[in-house]
Image: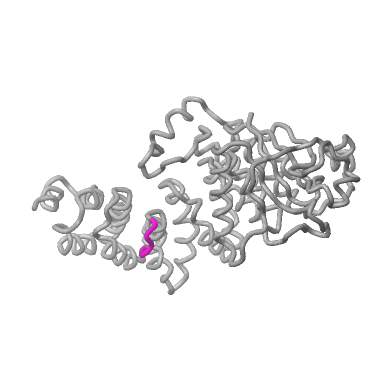
C-alpha cells in the first residue's frame, strides 16, 4: 500500500473526490506541514498554525499509479490560485502534494511539469516532502458521506465524472485475464526502448472492451479525458471506442476532442481502431484535408500513423489521392510501424485501382523500404511480387 497527501482546498470535498477512484484503499483528512503539534480544527482555522487542510490517500499502485492520482487531483483544483479554492480563503486552503520518498517526488514533479506546460503563469501548488500530518477530528472524516447535502467546493459534475470514471475502470478490471495480462505487454512491445515502452495492460480482450464502451456510450467528454490519461492501455482504448459512438451523433465535437487528445493514442491498435472511424469518416465529406498533412509532418510517429490510417475511410469512399500523396511524403519513414501502415493503405488502394498502385510502385519501388513494399504488393501474384521486389 502506497501513501500520498493532497491539499486541494476544503478537505471534505477533496476526500470525497479522491475516495471515488478504483485503487484508493483508504483516506483520512487532517492537518499537514504546520508548526503546532496535534492541532485542533479551531486552531488551524485561525491560519496561525501553518497547517494546511490535507487528505492522506492510501492506494494500490498496481491498480492506480501515483501519476494518475496526481493528474486526477489536478482536475479538482484551480492550480493558479494561491491560498484559495472556491469560496474558501486562507493559508489552510493552499494547494499542495506532499510526498514521503524520492521516487514519489520524481513522479509528482513529472506530473507537475505536464500541468505547468499548459499554463503561461506559474502554478501555485506546493510540491514538498511531508513534514507532519495529524489526523482530523472524527466528524470531519468522510464528511460528505455522513452529510450528503453538506458544503462542497467541488462541482457536482466533477464528482459525478469521478464516479463514472471509476465504474469503467472497475468493469474493465472485472474482465481481466491473467494469461492476456502476461502476453499483451510483449505483443505491444512495452520493454525499454520499444515503441510501447511503459504501457500497462489489465489483460482485457477487445470484444470485452467494446462491451464496456457500449454500456457507457453516453459518457461526458470530461470522463473520456480522464480515461485517455490512464496508464492502462485498455482504458484508453475504451475511451476511444466510446468516442466513436459519440461521433455518430456529434461528429464536429468528437473530431475536435480527438485531435486535442492524441497524447493518449500511443500504440498502433489505439490508432487503427479509432482514426478511420473518427477523423477518416469526418474527412470523407470535407474538401480540406490539411489536417492529414499536418499530422504527417509531425515528429510523433503515432500522429503520422493517424494521418495515414485515417485515409482508409477515404479509400473506401473512392478517394485515393491523399493516401498516395502521404505515401510519397513519408516514403522514407524509418519505423517499421509506419512502413507497414503505408504499405497497408497502398494495398487497399490497389484493391480498388490496381493501375494507380502499379504506377506508384513503378516510380518508387527502388526507393521504398522493403517492409512497405512487401505490404503494398501482398495481394499480387507471386510472379509480380518477385518483379517488384527485385532490384
On screen, residue 2 versus residue 315, left or right, reads right
Specify the principal SS of the magenta part: loop
Quadrant location of residue 169? top right
Front in this rendered view, residue 387 or 46: 46
Residue in the image at 57% along x and 32% along y: 62
On screen, residue 237 versus residue 168, left or right, reads left
Magenta includes 304?
no
On screen, residue 387 versus residue 19, left or right, reads left
Residue in the image at 76% along x and 57% along y: 83
Query: In this picture, which residue range is highlighted in magenta?
Result: 296-300
Magenta includes 299?
yes
Q: Is residue 385 above or below residue 327?
A: above
Front in this rendered view, residue 208 or 165: 165
Q: Position of residue 310 (x, y in %)?
A: 41, 59
Quadrant location of residue 79? bottom right
On screen, residue 309 versus residue 167, left or right, reads left
Amino acid at each position: 500500500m502506497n501513501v500520498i497527501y493532497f491539499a486541494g482546498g476544503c478537505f471534505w470535498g477533496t476526500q470525497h473526490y479522491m475516495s471515488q477512484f478504483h485503487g484508493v484503499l483508504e483516506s483520512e483528512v487532517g492537518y499537514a506541514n504546520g508548526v503546532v503539534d496535534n492541532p485542533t480544527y479551531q486552531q488551524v482555522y485561525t491560519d496561525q498554525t501553518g497547517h494546511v487542510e490535507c487528505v492522506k490517500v492510501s492506494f494500490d499502485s498496481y491498480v492506480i499509479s501515483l501519476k494518475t492520482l496526481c493528474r486526477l487531483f489536478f482536475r479538482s483544483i484551480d492550480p493558479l490560485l494561491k491560498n484559495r479554492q472556491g469560496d474558501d480563503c486562507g493559508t489552510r486552503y493552499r494547494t499542495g502534494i506532499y510526498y514521503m520518498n524520492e521516487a514519489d517526488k520524481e513522479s509528482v514533479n513529472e506530473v507537475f511539469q505536464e500541468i505547468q506546460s499548459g499554463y503561461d503563469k506559474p502554478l501555485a501548488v506546493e510540491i514538498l516532502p511531508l513534514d507532519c500530518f495529524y489526523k482530523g477530528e472524527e466528524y470531519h472524516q468522510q464528511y460528505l458521506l455522513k452529510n450528503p447535502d453538506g458544503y462542497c467546493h467541488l462541482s457536482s459534475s466533477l464528482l459525478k465524472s469521478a464516479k463514472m470514471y471509476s465504474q469503467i475502470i472497475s468493469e474493465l478490471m472485472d474482465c481481466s485475464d491473467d494469461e492476456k495480462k502476461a502476453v499483451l505487454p510483449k505483443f505491444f512491445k512495452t520493454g525499454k526502448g520499444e515503441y510501447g515502452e511503459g504501457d500497462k495492460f489489465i489483460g482485457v480482450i477487445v470484444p470485452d472492451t467494446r462491451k464496456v464502451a457500449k454500456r457507457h456510450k453516453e459518457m461526458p467528454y470530461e470522463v473520456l479525458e480522464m480515461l485517455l490519461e490512464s496508464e492502462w492501455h485498455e482504458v484508453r482504448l475504451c475511451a476511444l471506442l466510446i468516442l466513436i459512438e459519440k461521433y455518430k451523433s456529434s461528429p464536429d465535437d468528437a473530431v475536435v476532442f480527438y485531435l486535442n487528445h492524441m497524447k493518449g493514442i500511443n500504440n498502433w491498435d489505439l490508432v487503427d481502431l479509432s482514426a478511420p472511424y473518427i477523423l477518416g469518416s469526418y474527412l470523407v465529406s470535407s474538401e480540406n484535408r490539411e489536417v492529414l498533412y499536418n499530422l504527417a509532418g509531425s515528429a510523433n510517429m503515432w500522429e503520422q500513423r493517424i494521418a495515414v490510417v485515417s485515409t482508409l475511410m477515404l479509400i473506401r469512399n473512392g478517394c485515393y489521392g491523399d493516401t498516395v500523396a502521404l505515401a510519397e511524403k513519408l516514403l522514407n519513414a524509418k519505423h517499421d510501424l509506419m512502413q507497414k501502415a503505408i504499405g497497408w493503405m497502398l494495398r487497399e488502394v490497389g484493391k480498388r485501382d490496381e493501375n494507380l498502385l502499379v504506377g506508384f510502385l513503378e516510380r518508387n519501388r527502388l526507393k521504398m523500404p522493403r517492409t512497405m513494399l512487401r505490404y503494398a504488393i501482398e495481394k499480387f501474384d507471386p510472379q509480380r511480387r518477385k518483379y517488384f521486389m527485385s532490384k
